[in-house]
Amino acid sequence: MPLLASTDARDKFLKILSEVRDRYDVGLFGYVVMPEHVHLLISEPNIGDPSEVIAVLKQRVSRALRGRRKKHKRGQMRLWDEPKLARYARFWQRRFYDFNVWSVKKKNEK
């Protein structure tokens, strides 16, 4: 679902990304925010590991944006409450897909 489609959602994501980057002392070389997913080009963090960084980022973003989405018009169906629509309850996929970049050429490509 395009949960990052609005300017407000993207701005919130970038604010949280900056905070997480500072907290874990991780280099951010590039990013792309699309309506339904993101791509990040990061270094190994000096605090924690990449999985921890991504987990914290995803948790903070989903909490911040989901709280905003729970506000609904009177009588409007709430997607999270419908058992048959439970598959839409997740903001992010369960895991992330990493790719190690070993050369300057590959870094520039990514």
Image (tube, rainbow, N blue to C red):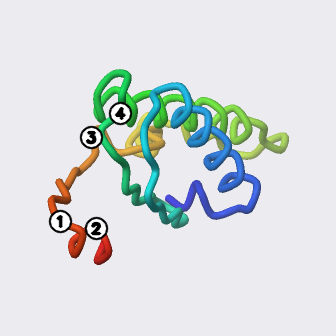
Distance, label 2 to label 4, CA atoms, is 17 Å
Write the residue at 57% across / 37% down: 61
Residue 50 placed where, x, y %? 30, 35
> Going from the N terminus, do you reach mark 1 or mark 3 first?
3
Distance, label 4 to label 3, CA atoms, is 18 Å
The reply to whether discs 2 and 4 touch (Cβ–Cβ < 8 Å) is no
Residue 5 placed where, x, y %? 63, 64
> Going from the N terminus, do you reach mark 2 or mark 3 first?
3
Residue receiving disc 3: 95
Distance, label 1 to label 3, CA atoms, is 25 Å
Q: Which numbered disc, 1 or 4, marks the residue closer to the eye?
A: 1
Number of the label disc, if any, that sits on residue 45: 4
Distance, label 1 to label 4, CA atoms, is 18 Å
Q: Identity of the amino acid at label 3?
A: Arg
Q: Which numbered disc, 4 or 3, marks the residue closer to the eye?
A: 4
Q: Identity of the amino acid at label 2?
A: Lys
Name the one closer to the observer, 109 or 70. Answer: 109
Label 1: few (<14), some or many (≥20) within 10 Å?
few
Number of the label disc, if any, that sits on residue 107: 2
Distance, label 1 to label 2, CA atoms, is 6 Å
Residue receiving disc 1: 103
Q: Residue furthest top?
A: 48
In the image, is residue 39 above or below residue 86?
below
Q: Which numbered disc, 2 or 3, marks the residue closer to the eye?
A: 2
Number of the label disc, if any, that sits on residue 72: none
